[in-house]
Amino acid sequence: MEAHFDRRGFVGALLVLPFGTFLLQCSSEKYGDNPAAAPQRSGTQTIYTSNEVNEHFHTYTMQDSVLTAGAAVDTFTTSSGGHSHPLQISAAQLQSVASGQTVKVTTQSAEGHTHIFTLVKVA
């Protein structure tokens, strides 16, 4: 019997990153609070993808310097589905990510919904 996996039928994948393990799980009910894609490095920044809500997701790009600056972040996600979301990350949350912990941050509501970003330190 041949196994067939599509994006919605994906049960789980384990991606090993240099600074730990990032678990991405999905189900037929969307992604829950799990990201639609694993974080990706691009030069001196990390691109995070939110969970999928209402058939779309958003991204947020964090410069490496943000983790060491010690200041809160007050920004917006990328636009998707015709809108973006305000995103606030506290200094304490950034310190937790910098120390290797996983932090989930919920956006502010836009178009009647929120998204969740899972922040991890990626080398």
Image: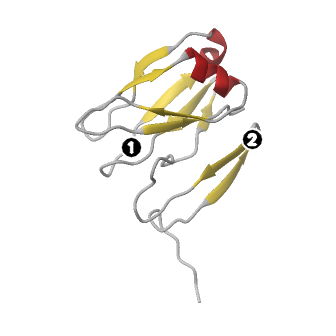
Instruction: List x then y, in percent, for residue 14.
Output: 67, 55
Q: In the image, what residue occupies the spot 40% across and 48% down?
A: 52
Residue 20 sits above or below residue 55 on the image: above
Q: In the depicted view, which residue is nearer to us: 70 or 49?
A: 70
Left or right, 19 with respect to 37, comes to right
Quarter assignment of residue 20: top right
Q: Marks 1 and 2, how far apart in space?
A: 24 Å
Name the image quarter holding the N terminus: bottom right
Left or right, 115 with respect to 68, comes to left
Disc 2 secondary structure class: strand
Q: Residues within 10 Å of mark 1 (few under 14, many from 20)?
A: many
Q: Which residue is mark 1?
A: 57
Mark 2 residue type: Gly
Disc 1 secondary structure class: loop
Q: In the image, what residue occupies the spot 69% across and 23% down?
A: 98
Mark 1 residue type: Phe
Quarter assignment of residue 3: bottom right
Q: Which mark is residue 20?
A: 2
